[in-house]
Image (tube, rainbow, N blue to C red):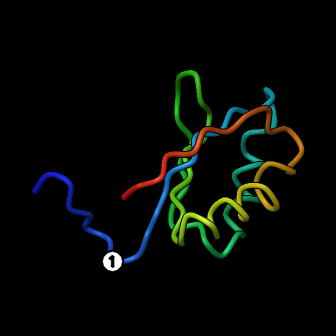
């Protein structure tokens, strides 16, 4: 059904771009974050897709304090699911 989440908790996706040669190190570091549900190396403009569980506020905090500071990350784009 359109507009109905299959997940009971709030969740979001983060698209990450990385410096060349850092992708697998970044994936390893992001995997250790407790809010991460899944992570994938993807092709295209973005390099990594991260699926996070948590409220919008806790997701913002996770991104700003645990994901963005990782060396080699050049940008992120967050998609909040409602």
Q: Is 15 placed above or below 26 here?
A: above
Give x and y (percent) for residue 56: 55, 64
Give x and y (percent) for residue 45: 58, 22
Residue at horizontal 53 percent and vertical 48 percent from the top: 40
Residue at horizontal 67 percent and vertical 63 percent from the top: 31
Give x and y (percent) for residue 47: 62, 33
- Left or right of 57, for residue 54: left
The furthest residue to the left:
1
Q: Is 33 placed above or below 41 here?
A: below
Query: The C terminus is located in which quarter?
Result: bottom left
What residue sits right under mark 1 in the picture? 8
- Left or right of 76, for residue 36: left
Query: The N terminus is located in which quarter?
Result: bottom left
Q: Nearer the viewer, residue 28 or 68?
A: 68
Residue at horizontal 73 percent and vertical 39 percent from the top: 23
Packing grade of label 1 (10 A; few <14, some 14-19, many >=20) is few
- Indicate the quadrant where residue 77 lies: top right
Which element type, helix, strand or loop, lies under badge 1? loop
Residue at horizontal 72 percent and vertical 69 percent from the top: 32
Task: Count up the numbered dots.
Answer: 1
Q: Nearer the viewer, residue 81 or 6?
A: 81
- Left or right of 8, for residue 13: right
Q: Nearer the viewer, residue 41 or 8?
A: 8
Give x and y (percent) for residue 2: 14, 51
């Amino acid at each position: 059904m359109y507009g109905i989440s299959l997940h009971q908790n709030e969740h979001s996706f983060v698209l990450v771009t990385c410096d060349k040669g850092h992708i697998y190190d970044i994936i390893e570091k992001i995997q250790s974050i407790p809010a991460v549900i899944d992570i994938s190396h993807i092709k295209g403009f973005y390099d990594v897709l991260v699926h996070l569980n948590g409220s919008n506020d806790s997701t913002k905090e996770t991104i700003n304090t645990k994901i963005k500071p990782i060396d080699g990350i050049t940008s992120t784009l967050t998609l909040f699911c409602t």
